[in-house]
Image: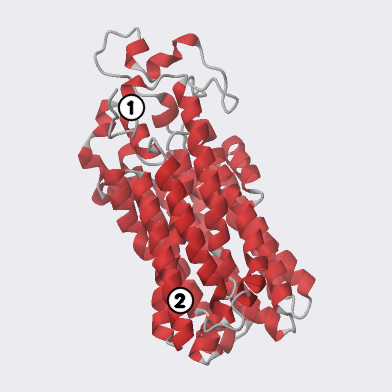
Amino acid sequence: MSASPATGRRPAAEISADDLPRLRRRTSAVLIASQILGGLGVPISIALAPVLATEVSGTEAVSGFASTAAVIGTAVVSLPLAALMTARGRRPGLVLAYAIGAAGACLVVLAATIGNFPLLLLGMAAFGAASSANLQSRFAAADLAAPDRRARAISLVVWASTIGAVLGPNLSAPASRSFAGTSIPQTAGPFVWAGAVFLLTGTLIAVFLRPDPLLTARALAAPADRAREGRSLRAGFAAVKASPRARLALLTVAVTHTTMVSIMVMTPMDLGHHGAGLELVGLVISGHIAGMFAFSPLMGWLADRLGRLSVIGLAAGLLSVAALLAGTAGPNHGQTAAGLFLLGLGWSAGMVSGSALLTDSVPQPARAAVQGLGDLTMNTAAGLGGASAGLVMSQAGYGWLNAIGAALLLPMAALALFTSRRHPAPAQPAPAPDAPDAAAPAAPASSSASVSPSASPSPSPSPSPSPSVDGVTDR
């Protein structure tokens, strides 16, 4: 039996209703494993990025530029990765992003060794490609998900980052000490380990993410949704322009990410100003990252049950309280830790609900392009916020930085309220009939007709679209 280029193993026409749940579980397992590894590689280094930037540059005023360069790098590669995934599928895009991240880690180590600040920024920008891969993985989880479980599918992959993300900052100190006595500065040591982790993660994706979830979803879609002209970046822009809810989703992920990044990157410096050591900084950042990822399944469940816009409102509330706590903490490290935890929790609510709403709101052929546009928008905005954060911190202080972050939430909350009143959601479709596994309600025996034309009683020569793949919920 010959493999299909669409799925990487066999023709989509031969994927039955019984196959699809197993394929969903396999895809989720691979993505979860890759997120655990990728989630370890990024935070093990990013916690020390401001410190490394200060050491290499000799001034605290540009300490936020290293983290900002990583965010900008994530943004810059978003559209090229989206174009590659649109043409070739998720797998080659994710593998390339992790490879670029590993190369960036090598450049950071070289820059720290020779004391070259511009090279450090270049390396951090390339390092950010690994973050782009981590972010894009959440959309890969949504490719084959039933519409009424799409937010939960996204949230499970986000949740998988918890293990590595919480351990990462706490491994920064031992990773640094592992290079004591060598020519590599200890603050650059974690980047050596991160590069190795990225290479391992890319290998895992290349070997096991088969068949490709995006190409499989496309092969199972209605014939009208397979048209190549609907897959371009231009079509993605047009899809966002035509959908008020897609525009809200873009604003949500952009504002949520910008608020989180701007406050988070300066928190280690504020803690240091109030006498905190490296271990305490690692614990606070770990608590923040736990808030970002550990409760994402709850946010996914809420987004599927209560609606995307309700959880967007929850995100605005959590982020506002976080800014209040962190901005007024001063030497109270416990209050700072509580604020950073809520900052992560608000990010989780906004990211999961916004990502699900973005996927819901555009046609299947344009989704990969629109998702890339979403990551470009949010990381560009966060890059600008991170760059400004260092300047605000040096001129006005950490309290004002938090106040500005809270003010950014006002347009998001206002647009969510306006959208809920002026553009009410369409009726929720019936649950997908093709998922007999535990992840969805049991399907009737005839449901295989929606996936496999060979089992369909319909006289139509073309396979009917699978409602679990192409149905859209836009609550």
Proximity of marks 1 and 2: CB atoms separated by less than 8 Å: no
Res 328 label = none
Q: Foreground residue, 309 or 415?
A: 309
Image location (x, y in percent) of residue 196:
49, 62
The residue drawn where x is 38% and y is 14% is 449
Residue ranking furthest to the front: 181
Q: Foreground residue, 164 or 134?
A: 164
Query: How far is the residue under mark 1 from the one under mark 2?
Result: 42 Å
Question: Pointer 1: residues within 10 angstroms few (<14), some, or many (20+)?
Answer: some
The residue drawn where x is 42% and y is 38% is 143
Q: At label 2, which amino acid type do we have?
A: Val
Image location (x, y in percent) of residue 328:
72, 76
- The residue labelled by disc 2 is 108
Res 10 label = 1
Question: Pointer 2: residues within 10 angstroms few (<14), some, or many (20+)?
Answer: many
Q: Foreground residue, 423 or 184?
A: 184
Height in image: 363 above or below 442?
below
Secondary structure found at label 1:
loop
Residue ranking furthest to the bottom: 58
Q: At label 1, which amino acid type do we have?
A: Arg
The earlier-in-sequence mark between 1 and 2 is 1
Secondary structure found at label 2:
helix
Q: Is residue 135 left or right of residue 47?
A: left
Height in image: 66 above or below 300?
below
Q: Foreground residue, 320 or 225?
A: 225
Image location (x, y in percent) of residue 333:
77, 74
Figure quadrant of the N terminus: top left
Q: Quadrant of residue 4?
A: top left
Image location (x, y in percent) of residue 323:
65, 68
Height in image: 62 above or below 241?
below
The residue drawn where x is 35% and y is 7% is 457
